Image (cartoon, rainbow, N blue to C red):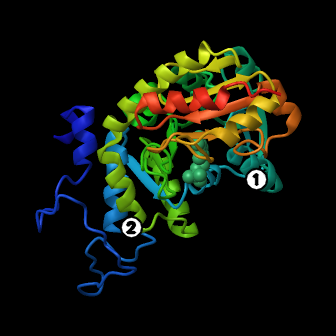
Amino acid sequence: MERQLKAETQLVHGAIGYDKTTGAVSMPIYQSATFRHPALNETTGYDYSRLQNPTREALEKTIAILDNARHGFAFSSGMAAITTVAKLFATGDHLVISDDLYGGTYRLFEEIYAKYGIETTYVNITDLDGVERSIKPNTKAILFETPTNPMLKVADIARLSALAKAHGALSIVDNTLLTPYLQKPLDLGADIAVYSATKFLAGHNDTLAGLITTNDDGIADALKLIQKSEGAVLAPFDSWLVLRGIKTLAVRMDRQQENAAAIAAFLSAHPEVTKVYYTGSGAVLSFSVRDTAVVEQVLRKVGVIYFAESLGGCETLITYPAVQTHSAIPEDIRRRLGVDDRLLRLSVGIEHVGDIIADLKQALEREDA
Ligand SMILES: *Cc1c(COP(=O)(O)O)cnc(C)c1O
């Protein structure tokens, strides 16, 4: 029944709607590590919170509904979700990965999984021929973000998923930047969608969380085994924070996207700004300034805008990818991609757009030498 509801309503109702025993319209926080068994070989469906917890399960079912997925899983951070996906692979497997992606994901594969013999090739994910040429006999997956972060290039999920399938590989999409409200990777053919729910889904810069969805029962069994064995599960209270955040995702995202479009237009016309990267979708945009002195000045002078890493919250944040989110990526790769020392990234919040633009204007104003 819920599946026929419009997106905005689905977000408010989630999987549970209201609590059927008390009528509570906010999902109760089941702050219990363990659950009493009625008798030998009997269970309420809950045994121990690493395996199942009602509040986490409400979130897992909610993200599944939002992604039109059969299965959802919640983890203690976005990286905990991505590392769970990485554990689907074994020594000798090869992954094709987008060269423009979250620095922490690059670090995970190069500094952790490389030791266990997982091979990687980084490619321009918008170049389908290049992606195809990078596929080897042992390629088991294509992993990418779209739009990419921080260069905001758009990848074709449907064609990349078809390409992966044709080579017996999985397609895995990190959908953190757009969320199911603006893009549903599984509907476009992806096998797995993964999220840092820390960002737009939770939306308030107050918790870390990660989510995974899939329609494949075999993949879901494998993910469940990793989740319960390794234990990087999302705590009940944090599950509740993400559920609460999801209720307002549509109104936040609509406002953030509207603000982002206005800010992109403002920056495009500014003499200190040499290039603006914005796809017109979502609320993350990047821009290059004339030189590093302008970067230093902007980061010192912003006031309404906070100089902090992360994205997707109510607050407008400005980030310097070269030294913050993407510092784990080697300098030569970063420069080739355009993630150089003149690039700034904005995650646009829900404040009044006039205040954000006025703040950027004063921060970019040329200081007399
Ligand atoms: C932040 C982020 C991550 C990592 O998520 P955490 O919740 O910080 O662990 C992964 N992918 C993308 C695209 C991100 O923005």
Residue 29 location, quadrant: bottom left
Q: Relative to 75, does residue 299 appear above or below in the rendering?
A: above
Single out the mark in the foreground, 2 or 1. 2
Q: Determine the secondary structure under disc 2.
A: helix
Measured as percent of width and height from the top left, residue 204 is found at: 43, 51
- Mark number for residue 113? 1
Q: Check the image and name the residue furthest to the top.
A: 269
Of residues 195 and 118, the one drawn nearer to the viewer in this rendering = 195
Residue 354 location, quadrant: top left
Residue 96 location, quadrant: top right
Residue depicted at 57% across the width and 21% down the height: 278
**Apparent side of residue 222 relative to residue 180 in the rendered image (left or right):** right
Report the residue marked by disc 2. 237
**What type is the residue that disc 2 sits on?**
Phe
Measured as percent of width and height from the top left, residue 186 is found at: 44, 33
Measured as percent of width and height from the top left, residue 132 is found at: 71, 21
Q: Residues within 10 Å of mark 2 (few under 14, many from 20)?
A: some
**What type is the residue that disc 1 sits on?**
Tyr
**Apparent side of residue 363 relative to residue 50 in the rendered image (left or right):** right
Q: Residues within 10 Å of mark 1 (few under 14, many from 20)?
A: some
Q: Check the image and name the residue furthest to the right.
A: 332
Residue depicted at 17% across the width and 58% down the height: 25
Which of the image's four quarters has the C terminus?
A: top right
- Mark number for residue 87? none
Q: Determine the secondary structure under disc 1.
A: helix
Q: How many marks?
A: 2
Residue 149 appearing in the image: no
**Apparent side of residue 83 relative to residue 336 in the rendered image (left or right):** left
Which of the image's four quarters has the N terminus?
A: top left
